[in-house]
Amino acid sequence: MIRISTGLEILEDEAAFLALFWLPADVTINTKDRVRIVVIAHGGSTASSMVDVATKLLGESWAYPIDAAIEVSPQVIFDRLRKHVSENPTTEGYLLMVDMGSPTNFGHEVEEEFGVRVKTLPLVSTLHVLDATRKAISGVSLDEIYRDTIAVTPQSMIPGLYQNEEQSARYVILTACLTGEGSSQVMKSFLKSNLQYNKNIFEIMAINAIDRDSLISKVMRINAERPVVSLVSSIPVEMDIKSYSLTEVLSLSAIKEIQAEIDLKTLIVNMDQVLKDVLVSIKEDGLNYKVNDLIKGMERDLGSIIPSDMLPGVIIHIACMVDRLVSGEPVTPFEGKDEYISENWERYDIVEKALSGFAGKYGVKVSNDEICFVMKFFEKDE
Protein backbone atom coordinates (compact mmCIF):
# COMPACT_ATOMS: atom_id res chain seq x y z
CA MET A 1 0.00 0.00 0.00
CA ILE A 2 2.84 2.40 0.81
CA ARG A 3 4.55 1.46 -2.45
CA ILE A 4 1.40 2.14 -4.47
CA SER A 5 0.49 5.40 -2.74
CA THR A 6 3.98 6.91 -2.90
CA GLY A 7 5.39 5.39 -6.06
CA LEU A 8 8.52 4.48 -4.09
CA GLU A 9 10.24 1.11 -4.03
CA ILE A 10 10.03 -0.17 -0.44
CA LEU A 11 12.46 -2.94 0.50
CA GLU A 12 11.21 -6.08 2.22
CA ASP A 13 13.60 -5.31 5.09
CA GLU A 14 11.64 -2.14 5.82
CA ALA A 15 8.39 -4.09 5.82
CA ALA A 16 9.92 -6.51 8.30
CA PHE A 17 10.93 -3.69 10.66
CA LEU A 18 7.41 -2.25 10.50
CA ALA A 19 5.94 -5.69 11.21
CA LEU A 20 7.82 -5.81 14.53
CA PHE A 21 5.47 -3.14 15.92
CA TRP A 22 2.56 -5.59 15.72
CA LEU A 23 4.31 -8.57 17.28
CA PRO A 24 3.28 -9.70 20.78
CA ALA A 25 5.75 -8.81 23.51
CA ASP A 26 6.78 -12.44 24.07
CA VAL A 27 7.82 -13.11 20.46
CA THR A 28 11.56 -13.41 19.90
CA ILE A 29 13.02 -12.63 16.50
CA ASN A 30 15.40 -15.14 14.92
CA THR A 31 18.52 -13.15 14.07
CA LYS A 32 20.64 -15.82 12.42
CA ASP A 33 22.53 -13.42 10.16
CA ARG A 34 24.66 -11.04 12.18
CA VAL A 35 28.16 -9.72 11.71
CA ARG A 36 30.73 -12.34 12.70
CA ILE A 37 33.66 -11.25 14.89
CA VAL A 38 37.00 -13.05 14.51
CA VAL A 39 39.92 -12.17 16.78
CA ILE A 40 43.43 -13.12 15.63
CA ALA A 41 46.35 -12.36 17.95
CA HIS A 42 49.87 -13.70 18.35
CA GLY A 43 50.64 -15.82 21.40
CA GLY A 44 49.45 -19.07 22.89
CA SER A 45 46.14 -17.72 24.27
CA THR A 46 46.04 -13.97 23.58
CA ALA A 47 42.98 -14.03 21.32
CA SER A 48 41.19 -16.61 23.48
CA SER A 49 41.70 -14.50 26.60
CA MET A 50 40.21 -11.37 25.02
CA VAL A 51 37.22 -13.29 23.66
CA ASP A 52 36.72 -15.03 27.02
CA VAL A 53 36.46 -11.67 28.80
CA ALA A 54 33.92 -10.40 26.26
CA THR A 55 31.87 -13.60 26.53
CA LYS A 56 31.73 -13.47 30.34
CA LEU A 57 30.80 -9.77 30.44
CA LEU A 58 28.17 -9.96 27.70
CA GLY A 59 26.75 -13.34 28.67
CA GLU A 60 26.81 -14.65 25.11
CA SER A 61 29.48 -16.38 23.05
CA TRP A 62 29.80 -14.72 19.65
CA ALA A 63 33.38 -13.65 18.88
CA TYR A 64 35.68 -16.42 17.62
CA PRO A 65 39.35 -16.50 18.73
CA ILE A 66 42.32 -17.69 16.66
CA ASP A 67 45.52 -17.88 18.69
CA ALA A 68 48.53 -17.38 16.42
CA ALA A 69 51.49 -19.04 18.10
CA ILE A 70 54.79 -17.50 17.03
CA GLU A 71 56.11 -20.79 15.61
CA VAL A 72 52.99 -21.38 13.46
CA SER A 73 53.13 -20.20 9.83
CA PRO A 74 50.72 -17.49 8.53
CA GLN A 75 49.25 -20.02 6.09
CA VAL A 76 48.15 -22.28 8.95
CA ILE A 77 46.48 -19.32 10.66
CA PHE A 78 44.75 -18.33 7.42
CA ASP A 79 43.49 -21.89 6.93
CA ARG A 80 41.88 -21.75 10.38
CA LEU A 81 40.18 -18.52 9.39
CA ARG A 82 38.96 -20.02 6.08
CA LYS A 83 37.56 -23.04 7.93
CA HIS A 84 35.67 -20.82 10.37
CA VAL A 85 34.20 -18.67 7.61
CA SER A 86 33.11 -21.70 5.59
CA GLU A 87 31.45 -23.30 8.63
CA ASN A 88 29.84 -20.08 9.91
CA PRO A 89 28.42 -18.24 6.89
CA THR A 90 26.70 -14.89 7.20
CA THR A 91 25.41 -12.33 4.73
CA GLU A 92 26.27 -9.48 7.11
CA GLY A 93 30.06 -9.77 6.79
CA TYR A 94 33.02 -10.38 9.07
CA LEU A 95 35.07 -8.08 11.26
CA LEU A 96 38.65 -9.33 11.62
CA MET A 97 40.27 -7.95 14.75
CA VAL A 98 44.02 -8.57 14.61
CA ASP A 99 47.04 -7.42 16.55
CA MET A 100 49.77 -7.15 13.88
CA GLY A 101 51.62 -8.85 11.02
CA SER A 102 50.26 -11.07 8.25
CA PRO A 103 46.66 -11.39 9.56
CA THR A 104 46.09 -7.72 8.70
CA ASN A 105 46.07 -8.81 5.05
CA PHE A 106 43.72 -11.80 5.38
CA GLY A 107 40.54 -9.80 4.82
CA HIS A 108 40.97 -9.22 1.10
CA GLU A 109 41.64 -12.91 0.45
CA VAL A 110 38.53 -13.94 2.39
CA GLU A 111 36.42 -11.47 0.42
CA GLU A 112 37.64 -12.86 -2.90
CA GLU A 113 37.24 -16.51 -1.95
CA PHE A 114 33.87 -16.37 -0.20
CA GLY A 115 32.27 -13.31 -1.81
CA VAL A 116 31.49 -11.71 1.55
CA ARG A 117 32.38 -8.31 2.98
CA VAL A 118 35.28 -8.15 5.44
CA LYS A 119 36.62 -5.26 7.51
CA THR A 120 39.96 -5.51 9.33
CA LEU A 121 40.76 -3.65 12.53
CA PRO A 122 44.46 -3.75 13.61
CA LEU A 123 46.03 -3.25 17.05
CA VAL A 124 43.15 -5.04 18.75
CA SER A 125 42.58 -4.77 22.51
CA THR A 126 40.12 -6.39 24.91
CA LEU A 127 38.11 -3.16 24.95
CA HIS A 128 37.81 -3.26 21.14
CA VAL A 129 36.65 -6.89 21.23
CA LEU A 130 34.07 -6.15 23.92
CA ASP A 131 32.65 -3.14 22.08
CA ALA A 132 32.51 -4.84 18.66
CA THR A 133 31.01 -8.07 20.03
CA ARG A 134 28.31 -6.19 21.94
CA LYS A 135 27.27 -4.37 18.77
CA ALA A 136 27.37 -7.53 16.63
CA ILE A 137 25.12 -9.38 19.08
CA SER A 138 22.64 -6.50 18.87
CA GLY A 139 22.49 -6.73 15.06
CA VAL A 140 24.44 -3.57 14.21
CA SER A 141 25.80 -3.36 10.63
CA LEU A 142 29.42 -4.10 9.72
CA ASP A 143 30.16 -0.52 8.68
CA GLU A 144 28.74 0.89 11.92
CA ILE A 145 30.59 -1.61 14.10
CA TYR A 146 33.85 -0.86 12.30
CA ARG A 147 33.37 2.91 12.54
CA ASP A 148 32.44 2.89 16.22
CA THR A 149 35.04 0.33 17.30
CA ILE A 150 37.95 2.01 15.57
CA ALA A 151 37.07 5.15 17.52
CA VAL A 152 37.32 3.35 20.86
CA THR A 153 40.28 4.61 22.87
CA PRO A 154 41.37 2.69 25.97
CA GLN A 155 42.65 5.97 27.47
CA SER A 156 39.06 7.09 27.91
CA MET A 157 38.64 4.37 30.55
CA ILE A 158 41.46 5.67 32.78
CA PRO A 159 39.89 7.45 35.81
CA GLY A 160 40.92 11.07 36.15
CA LEU A 161 42.61 11.33 32.75
CA TYR A 162 39.97 13.67 31.37
CA GLN A 163 38.39 16.47 33.36
CA ASN A 164 35.53 18.97 32.96
CA GLU A 165 34.20 19.12 29.39
CA GLU A 166 36.21 16.07 28.32
CA GLN A 167 34.86 13.90 31.13
CA SER A 168 32.10 11.43 30.27
CA ALA A 169 28.61 12.48 31.32
CA ARG A 170 27.43 10.82 34.52
CA TYR A 171 23.85 10.12 33.43
CA VAL A 172 22.31 8.96 30.14
CA ILE A 173 18.96 9.63 28.47
CA LEU A 174 18.29 7.02 25.79
CA THR A 175 16.21 7.18 22.63
CA ALA A 176 15.64 3.83 20.94
CA CYS A 177 14.06 2.41 17.82
CA LEU A 178 14.34 -0.64 15.61
CA THR A 179 17.43 -1.22 13.47
CA GLY A 180 18.13 1.85 11.38
CA GLU A 181 18.14 4.47 14.17
CA GLY A 182 15.59 6.62 12.30
CA SER A 183 13.17 7.66 15.02
CA SER A 184 15.81 7.41 17.76
CA GLN A 185 17.89 10.10 16.02
CA VAL A 186 14.81 12.27 15.55
CA MET A 187 13.93 11.89 19.24
CA LYS A 188 17.50 12.66 20.25
CA SER A 189 17.41 15.94 18.32
CA PHE A 190 13.96 16.74 19.69
CA LEU A 191 15.03 16.17 23.30
CA LYS A 192 18.21 18.20 22.85
CA SER A 193 16.06 21.09 21.59
CA ASN A 194 13.42 20.87 24.32
CA LEU A 195 15.41 19.99 27.44
CA GLN A 196 17.79 22.11 29.46
CA TYR A 197 20.74 20.13 30.76
CA ASN A 198 24.46 20.27 31.50
CA LYS A 199 26.33 18.26 28.87
CA ASN A 200 29.00 17.40 31.42
CA ILE A 201 26.33 15.67 33.52
CA PHE A 202 23.90 14.28 30.92
CA GLU A 203 24.27 12.64 27.53
CA ILE A 204 21.35 11.99 25.19
CA MET A 205 22.19 8.83 23.27
CA ALA A 206 20.39 7.23 20.32
CA ILE A 207 20.50 3.45 20.08
CA ASN A 208 18.92 0.83 17.83
CA ALA A 209 17.59 -2.66 18.49
CA ILE A 210 16.23 -5.59 16.51
CA ASP A 211 13.47 -6.52 18.97
CA ARG A 212 12.30 -5.96 22.54
CA ASP A 213 14.74 -8.45 24.06
CA SER A 214 17.76 -6.90 22.37
CA LEU A 215 16.59 -3.43 23.39
CA ILE A 216 16.25 -4.44 27.05
CA SER A 217 19.66 -6.13 26.94
CA LYS A 218 21.32 -3.07 25.41
CA VAL A 219 19.69 -0.65 27.86
CA MET A 220 20.72 -2.76 30.85
CA ARG A 221 24.33 -2.90 29.66
CA ILE A 222 24.45 0.87 29.31
CA ASN A 223 22.76 1.28 32.69
CA ALA A 224 25.45 -0.89 34.28
CA GLU A 225 28.07 1.60 33.10
CA ARG A 226 26.16 4.85 33.70
CA PRO A 227 22.68 5.30 35.19
CA VAL A 228 19.95 5.67 32.55
CA VAL A 229 17.58 8.43 33.67
CA SER A 230 14.91 7.96 31.01
CA LEU A 231 14.19 5.84 27.93
CA VAL A 232 12.21 7.09 24.94
CA SER A 233 11.33 4.11 22.77
CA SER A 234 9.36 3.35 19.62
CA ILE A 235 8.51 -0.08 21.03
CA PRO A 236 7.01 -0.57 24.52
CA VAL A 237 9.19 -2.32 27.09
CA GLU A 238 8.74 -3.18 30.76
CA MET A 239 11.76 -2.15 32.83
CA ASP A 240 12.56 -0.47 36.11
CA ILE A 241 13.86 2.48 34.11
CA LYS A 242 11.25 5.17 33.45
CA SER A 243 10.13 4.82 29.82
CA TYR A 244 8.16 7.08 27.49
CA SER A 245 6.58 6.57 24.07
CA LEU A 246 7.31 8.76 21.07
CA THR A 247 3.80 10.20 21.33
CA GLU A 248 4.31 11.22 24.96
CA VAL A 249 7.50 13.04 24.05
CA LEU A 250 6.34 14.67 20.81
CA SER A 251 3.16 15.92 22.51
CA LEU A 252 5.43 17.45 25.20
CA SER A 253 3.49 15.67 27.96
CA ALA A 254 6.63 13.80 29.04
CA ILE A 255 9.09 16.69 28.66
CA LYS A 256 8.16 18.28 31.99
CA GLU A 257 8.66 14.99 33.83
CA ILE A 258 12.02 14.27 32.17
CA GLN A 259 13.16 17.84 32.86
CA ALA A 260 12.22 17.47 36.54
CA GLU A 261 14.39 14.35 36.78
CA ILE A 262 17.25 16.19 35.06
CA ASP A 263 16.94 19.08 37.50
CA LEU A 264 16.94 16.72 40.48
CA LYS A 265 19.99 14.79 39.27
CA THR A 266 21.80 18.07 38.53
CA LEU A 267 21.07 19.30 42.04
CA ILE A 268 22.47 16.10 43.54
CA VAL A 269 25.63 16.41 41.43
CA ASN A 270 26.11 20.03 42.52
CA MET A 271 25.71 19.01 46.16
CA ASP A 272 29.23 17.59 46.08
CA GLN A 273 30.78 21.04 46.55
CA VAL A 274 28.02 22.13 48.94
CA LEU A 275 28.79 19.25 51.30
CA LYS A 276 32.52 20.00 51.16
CA ASP A 277 31.78 23.58 52.22
CA VAL A 278 29.36 22.64 55.01
CA LEU A 279 30.86 19.52 56.58
CA VAL A 280 33.58 19.86 59.21
CA SER A 281 35.31 16.49 59.41
CA ILE A 282 34.47 14.69 56.17
CA LYS A 283 36.01 16.26 53.09
CA GLU A 284 35.84 13.84 50.19
CA ASP A 285 34.77 13.76 46.56
CA GLY A 286 31.55 11.96 45.70
CA LEU A 287 30.00 11.83 49.18
CA ASN A 288 26.72 12.99 47.63
CA TYR A 289 26.66 9.96 45.34
CA LYS A 290 27.51 7.58 48.18
CA VAL A 291 24.69 8.89 50.36
CA ASN A 292 22.28 8.83 47.41
CA ASP A 293 23.17 5.18 46.74
CA LEU A 294 22.62 4.44 50.44
CA ILE A 295 19.15 6.00 50.27
CA LYS A 296 18.26 4.11 47.09
CA GLY A 297 19.22 0.86 48.80
CA MET A 298 16.96 1.62 51.76
CA GLU A 299 14.11 2.60 49.41
CA ARG A 300 14.44 -0.74 47.64
CA ASP A 301 14.51 -2.77 50.87
CA LEU A 302 11.69 -0.81 52.50
CA GLY A 303 9.51 -0.57 49.41
CA SER A 304 9.08 3.14 50.11
CA ILE A 305 10.26 5.93 47.82
CA ILE A 306 11.28 9.33 49.19
CA PRO A 307 9.62 12.12 47.13
CA SER A 308 11.99 13.84 44.70
CA ASP A 309 11.61 17.23 46.34
CA MET A 310 12.67 15.72 49.69
CA LEU A 311 15.67 13.73 48.43
CA PRO A 312 18.29 16.53 48.52
CA GLY A 313 17.32 17.34 52.11
CA VAL A 314 17.64 13.68 53.16
CA ILE A 315 21.08 13.47 51.54
CA ILE A 316 22.21 16.53 53.48
CA HIS A 317 20.70 15.19 56.72
CA ILE A 318 22.54 11.85 56.53
CA ALA A 319 25.84 13.42 55.43
CA CYS A 320 25.69 15.94 58.27
CA MET A 321 24.69 13.22 60.74
CA VAL A 322 27.77 11.14 59.97
CA ASP A 323 29.96 14.26 59.99
CA ARG A 324 28.68 15.18 63.47
CA LEU A 325 29.46 11.69 64.72
CA VAL A 326 32.99 11.87 63.33
CA SER A 327 33.41 15.30 64.97
CA GLY A 328 32.19 13.92 68.31
CA GLU A 329 29.22 16.29 68.62
CA PRO A 330 26.30 15.35 70.92
CA VAL A 331 23.29 13.50 69.49
CA THR A 332 19.83 15.11 69.57
CA PRO A 333 17.39 12.85 71.49
CA PHE A 334 14.43 11.37 69.60
CA GLU A 335 11.29 11.72 71.72
CA GLY A 336 9.48 8.42 72.32
CA LYS A 337 12.36 6.47 70.80
CA ASP A 338 11.74 3.07 72.42
CA GLU A 339 8.03 3.03 71.65
CA TYR A 340 8.64 4.18 68.06
CA ILE A 341 11.17 1.40 67.46
CA SER A 342 8.90 -1.28 68.91
CA GLU A 343 6.03 -0.14 66.67
CA ASN A 344 8.21 -0.05 63.55
CA TRP A 345 10.63 -2.91 64.18
CA GLU A 346 10.98 -4.11 60.59
CA ARG A 347 11.71 -0.63 59.31
CA TYR A 348 14.17 -0.09 62.15
CA ASP A 349 16.04 -3.30 61.32
CA ILE A 350 16.52 -2.31 57.66
CA VAL A 351 17.54 1.30 58.35
CA GLU A 352 19.84 0.29 61.23
CA LYS A 353 21.76 -2.18 59.10
CA ALA A 354 22.12 0.29 56.21
CA LEU A 355 23.23 3.23 58.37
CA SER A 356 25.55 1.13 60.54
CA GLY A 357 27.33 -0.24 57.48
CA PHE A 358 27.71 3.23 55.97
CA ALA A 359 28.84 4.97 59.17
CA GLY A 360 31.19 2.10 59.97
CA LYS A 361 33.31 3.09 56.98
CA TYR A 362 34.07 6.32 58.84
CA GLY A 363 34.78 4.57 62.13
CA VAL A 364 31.64 5.73 63.95
CA LYS A 365 28.47 4.10 65.31
CA VAL A 366 24.97 5.41 64.67
CA SER A 367 22.73 5.78 67.73
CA ASN A 368 19.11 4.66 67.89
CA ASP A 369 18.09 8.34 68.02
CA GLU A 370 19.74 9.02 64.66
CA ILE A 371 18.22 5.86 63.19
CA CYS A 372 14.73 6.96 64.24
CA PHE A 373 15.16 10.38 62.61
CA VAL A 374 16.07 8.70 59.31
CA MET A 375 13.18 6.23 59.65
CA LYS A 376 10.75 9.16 59.70
CA PHE A 377 11.77 10.11 56.16
CA PHE A 378 10.30 6.85 54.90
CA GLU A 379 6.85 7.47 56.36
CA LYS A 380 4.53 8.44 53.51
CA ASP A 381 2.76 11.17 55.43
CA GLU A 382 5.81 12.66 57.15
Image: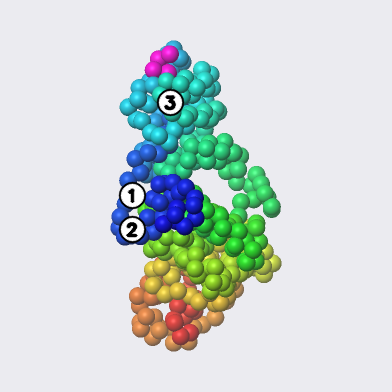
Q: Which residues are magenta?
A: 75-79
Please tell me whether mark 2 sits on a helix, a strand or a loop. Answer: loop
206 falls in the magenta region: no
Please tell me whether mark 3 sits on a helix, a strand or a loop. Answer: loop
- In the displayed structure, would residue 343 be above or below residue 138? below
| Distance of label 3 from label 2 (alpha carbons) | 34 Å
Q: Is residue 363 left or right of residue 302?
A: right
The amino acid pointed to by label 1 is Ile
Residue at image point 47% right, 80% down = 376
Residue at image point 47% right, 66% down = 245
The residue carrying mark 2 is 23
Residue 204 spot, x, y in % from top left: 58, 57
Residue 115 shows which numbered tag?
3
Proximity of marks 1 and 3: CB atoms separated by less than 8 Å: no
Residue 133 spot, x, y in % from top left: 44, 39
How busy is the neighbourhood of tag 3: few (under 14 within 10 Å), some, or many (20 plus)?
A: few
Please tell me whether mark 1 sits on a helix, a strand or a loop. Answer: loop
Q: Looking at the image, is mark 1 or mark 3 earlier in the sequence?
A: 1
Q: Is residue 44 left or right of residue 193?
A: left
The residue carrying mark 1 is 29
Proximity of marks 2 and 1: CB atoms separated by less than 8 Å: yes
